[in-house]
Amino acid sequence: MDKKRIIIGLSIAAVLIVLFCVVPAQHWFGLIAMLAVGGLGTWEFYGLLEAGGMGASKKWGTFTGLVFIAATWFYMIGSKDPALCQELPPDTTLWSVLLIVIISNFFRILRYENMRQGLENALGTLLGFLYVPFLWSFFIRVFLSGDISKPGWAGFYLLMMMKLSDSGGYFVGTKFGKHRLAPVISPKKSWEGLLGGIAVCIIANFVWILVTGGKLGSFSIGLFDAIALGILIPVVGTLGDLVESMFKRAVDVKDSNTMVYGLGGILDMTDSILFASPLLYIYMKFALS
């Protein structure tokens, strides 16, 4: 086991725990953090495409991604304010921004003399937008789903469950992993590791219910939800991890960046969260409402 990697990971976790437990969800620091993670992750993804010789409008794609992330933030803040909702429906504003972002990327095809190159760049740019900013926007939805004057407990819940299941999968897979989960994409991942991550996540969900009473933003989870989410979060998170591994393997890159020793870049640290966030948001809306 890489002890240095574990120490760095635990240090980052400690900082995040303090921030999630102290800073109100609506604080401007939260917006800056969401923009930083989404922007850096988008930039890294376009770097992967660039390394593979695939076209994309790196600056424009990152800029429009940041615009949509900010729009999602203000949409969630505005949805908590009845007066603002009457003056300007926040959902209408958000989807208008999304439409403008998508159309603007296709309009950029017209500036290329080589239409095929323009089409490839537009598709690459849209892929990056959908993969990072669009999926990341669901983490913002989860983060701001409760009382925004208090810390974003639902976001903390998702981050903790995902990382605990990742850690459980890492330790179990390292010690007992024999049956490869996806040998071509990620040879180190095993079925034993996935089962270990699920077991840890279910236990963590039970602990969450004992400590918080099952509170999850403006929703609450029970024992059935603890088991369901304990299974779904690691499975979908692992899928997200495999998708990013597929991208990196396709362009022959080990990490999306070398920002943090042993953990890679922002995209390497959030790949599972990008897929788990929409899952939890949908589960909260349809199973917990």
Image: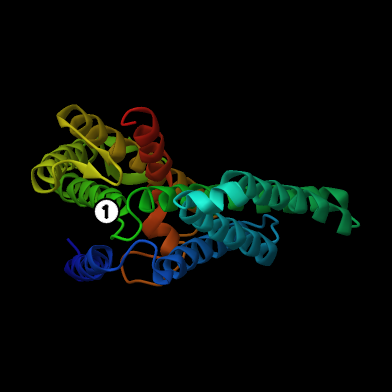
Q: Where is residue 138 drawn, in percent x and y?
A: 45, 47
Looking at this view, is 98 or 39 the one in front?
98
Residue 61 quadrant: bottom right
- State left or right for residue 235 relative to residue 86: left
Residue 111 sits above or below residue 22 on the image: above
Looking at this view, is 178 or 248 the one in front?
248
Q: What colouring method underlies this structural image?
A: rainbow
- State left or right for residue 167 relative to residue 150: left
- State left or right for residue 96 relative to residue 211: right
Residue located at (32% from left, 53% from top): 147
**Residue bearing mark 1:** 153
Residue located at (25% from left, 50% from top): 157
| Dot 1 alpha-carbon crowd within 10 angstroms: few under 14, some 14 to 19, many 20 or more | many
Q: Where is residue 251 drawn, in percent x and y?
A: 55, 54
Disc 1 marks a residue whose amino acid type is: Trp
The outermost residue toward the right is 113
Residue located at (40% from left, 66% from top): 30
